Amino acid sequence: MKNSKELRTWLDDLYINHPLVIAGPCSAETEEQVLKTAHKLKDSDVNYFRAGIWKPRTRPGNFEGVGALGLKWLQKVKAETGMKTAVEVANAGHVKLAIEHDIDLLWIGARSTVSPFIVQEIADALEGTDKIVLVKNPVNQDLALWLGGVERLHSSNIKKLGVIHRGFSSYQKTRYRNNPEWQIPIELQNRFPDLPLICDPSHITGKREMIFEVSQTALDLNFNGLMIETHIDPDNAWSDAAQQVTPDTLIQMMKKLKIRKETDTEAEYRNALNTLRTQIDIIDHQLIEIFGKRMEIADGIGELKKEKNVAILQSKRWNEILGKMILKGEENQLSEEFILKVFKAIHQESINHQEKVMNR
């Protein structure tokens, strides 16, 4: 996929004044629930109504979707509201049924993206169609695997392509359900600036109260759209209740989101500057989290030294660290003066933490 310019065409032709918005319930539960939610969104800026028909669950026994029956409900949504429709597909059978029911947009979920076999099966089933197909990032932090999915679809002559950023799983507990790891979609943008990029703040956050914040960050990073899970009665949803918002909440949220428009040279400059500043803000937050984790380890070292009655300051170890970091800094075009200042401050904070432990 050497040139991604042709992939952007479908997006530019349809949505000029606002980002693409895909919204609807995590799961289609009943015909009434689907239609009520859709009618609430009918006159909003939502472009595609989504609903989960087949729900891949981590463990068996949980609700796994109503299946093909839900596709008929989506046909009613289109007939009654005029909204286009979107569903997740995970195999060739899903693709066939979605096409038969005139679904407009298909996406491949994170669990499917991890398997080139599954993506290839879907690509073969879609070959030559004019459907819009979006690929969610794989569960783990693997940009090559994510792009590989897009390339397989592109090789099947599918031109209306894009990607969805839904965050990545982590063994460490964080404030997110799936860590955004913004540097990965930023790298994707740098490589393929014309590949449409959608953010799924519902799956990134896992919490409805954080959706606005993550949505705004995505727009500040020049994402092309949002996929937000929206339910008529989210507290009683059959799946992922905590991350869904009501249609009214979504409509108000979209009014509050700041959309940057490129109208002249000065605006383009401000937009570019804002994007770069947002990237710096994200990295700064990551640095603070990393420093916090480093000091937790320092606390553990302090406990061990206290137990063995060992002195806090280990000059030989400190000099070894400093020498390695100066060399590493040079590799990354960082001056020795900067490295010395930063690591002396880190070392002092580490000593402070160990002293607190020793004095307890």
Image: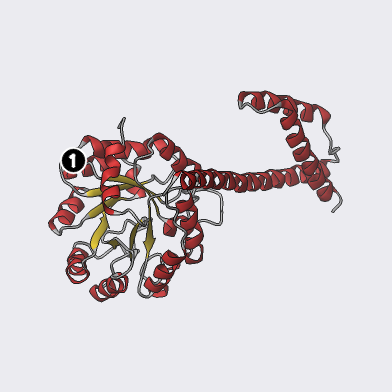
Disc 1 crowd, CA 10 A, few/some/many (<14, 14-19, 20+) = some
Q: Give percent across and percent down for residue 149.
A: 31, 39
Residue shown at the point (33%, 50%) measured from the top left: 109
Residue 116, can we see it?
no
Q: Quadrant of the C terminus?
A: bottom right
Residue linked to disc 1 = 124
Horizontal side of 289 relative to 313 (left or right) equals: left
Vertical position of residue 251 compared to residue 117: above or below: below
Residue shown at the point (12%, 56%) measured from the top left: 100
Residue 127, can we see it?
yes
Q: In which quarter of the image is the N terminus?
A: top left
Report the number of discs: 1
* Nearer to me, 81 or 24: 81
Q: Name the secondary structure under disc 1.
A: helix
* Nearer to me, 13 or 170: 13
Vertical position of residue 217 compared to residue 41: above or below: above
Horizontal side of 280 relative to 315 (left or right) equals: left
Q: What colour scheme governs how the chains and residues are painted in the rendered image of this protein? A: secondary structure
Q: Give percent across and percent down for residue 128.
A: 15, 41
Q: Give percent across and percent down for residue 333.
A: 63, 26
Horizontal side of 86 relative to 224 (left or right) equals: left
Q: Give percent across and percent down for residue 181.
A: 50, 45
Q: Which amino acid does label 1 sit on?
A: Asp
